[in-house]
Amino acid sequence: MTRLARAVLVTTICLLALVAACTDDVSTAAADVDVVQPVYDFTPTGDDPITPLPTHVVLDARKVALGESLFRDPILSPEGDVACVTCHELGRGGCDGRRTSDLPGHAPWLVNTPTIFNVAYNFKFHWGGAFTDLDHQLTAPVTSPRALATTYDDIVKRLSASAEYRAAFQDVFSDGVTAANFRDVMVTYERSLITPNARFDQYLRGDKQALTDEERAGYELFKSHGCISCHQGVNIGGNMFQRFGALRDYFVERGRVTEGDLGRYNVTKREEDRHVFRVPSLRNVAVTAPYFHDGAVKTLEEAVQIMSEYQLGRPVTDDQLRLLVAFLKTLTGEYQGKVLL
Ligand code: HEC
Ligand code: HEC
């Protein structure tokens, strides 16, 4: 190699390194921006399409505690029989294991209940992305005839009639029980519901032993097979809309199309949004069966087979299926120090 050629080569390599360093900086900055003030105990390198959940979030502990009581308390419902935990059970992956969470005497649901864990990391809420922030979303379970079937005014009345809740609100807010304060504590509590420290997150943070060879191969396949194009980011999903049945019609084959199957169309009424859904988070997916917006699929194996065929247009082999499922099982995190079951 001539001296000139070598000089050009060296300059090129330096420039490439500089570009790489800059790109790194940009993605690191983006990964740090977060609505819930995450505390990362590692520096994201920016070269993985998935980032670990923060290990904890900085929130007002008094609001979290009050929100937790309210989330569990059927006092929110007019008959005193329904609480948020009725459908979002923390001991059942933040959902309730049912196809749809129909309550006796209430209208039936058209969609499966999504998990409440890590909810703050979704870019929009509900299967069709009807809500952009948790404060607005709260109005849905509060007023829906399928859930609490009440109003903020009535909740304020019921809470104000309780000496304990009056005192608890007074403790945190100078103006005591109000609808705004109720919403504030509920949303603060929801932000606290994170499940960090999944084995996969331990792996991303640098502990290469946290995954077995098979699970690591499953992650590589998750990327090379194309799952990563839709399931990515800190929630491994929850950050974009996609059509369910991108490459093969799920709905024609399943039959009996309901309003719940229309997805984002219900929000926008635009033809191109028919059957478009928010890509769900795959965090804790091993403990959130049944799957899909219709809750029609009971096992992770079947869900992965359907994804591969309908979203990517090719079936998985038995080996591929085993690896993908092994990887998905490493996404189960911890709530308050205990691995979800
Ligand atoms: C009877 C069952 C039921 C009850 C009770 C219930 N929910 Fe839900 N929740 C659902 C269903 C079903 C959805 C999905 C609705 C949709 O996508 O159209 C949902 C969605 C959510 C979401 C959005 C999740 C996401 O990722 O999009 C949040 C947040 C939530 N509920 C919070 C609450 C809170 C807070 C309460 C109590 C005030 C509550 N829920 C009570 C069934 C319930
Ligand atoms: C083109 C985008 C896209 C690709 C590619 C994709 N998915 Fe999905 N995935 C979705 C959407 C959208 C849903 C929600 C479908 C519904 O319920 O309507 C979903 C749902 C799921 C669910 C069910 C989650 C739940 O809580 O109900 C699993 C599991 C899943 N995907 C795994 C995978 C795997 C594994 C791959 C690769 C083989 C993959 N996905 C590829 C878009 C995609």
Image: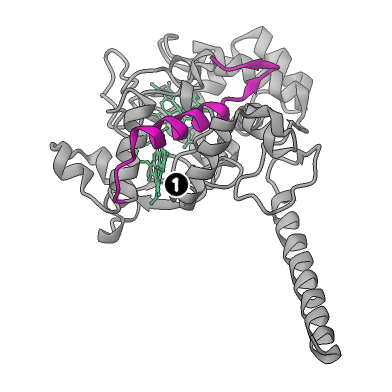
Q: Nearer the viewer, residue 18 or 41?
A: 18
**Is 239 situated above or below 316?**
below
Residue 13 x %, y %:
78, 75
* Residue 332 on the magenta span: yes
Residue shown at 74%/31% (left/top)? 55
- Kind of residue sitting beneath label 1: Cys
Determine the image quadrant of residue 162: top right
- In magenta, the rendered stretch is 313-341
Q: How is the image coloured?
A: one colour
Residue shown at 55%/13% (left/top)? 72
Lateral position of residue 335 relative to residue 301, left or right: right
**Is 306 situated above or below 114?**
below
Residue 214 x %, y %:
54, 31
* Residue 74 on the magenta span: no
Extreme residue in the front direction: 1
The quadrant where ligand 2 appears is top left
Q: Is residue 244 visible?
A: no
Q: Is mark 1 within 8 Å of ligand 2?
A: yes
Lateral position of residue 152 relative to residue 100, left or right: right
Q: Nearer the viewer, residue 241 or 133?
A: 241
Residue shown at 70%/18% (left/top)? 65
Residue located beneath label 1 in the image = 227
**Is 313 situated above or below 101?**
below
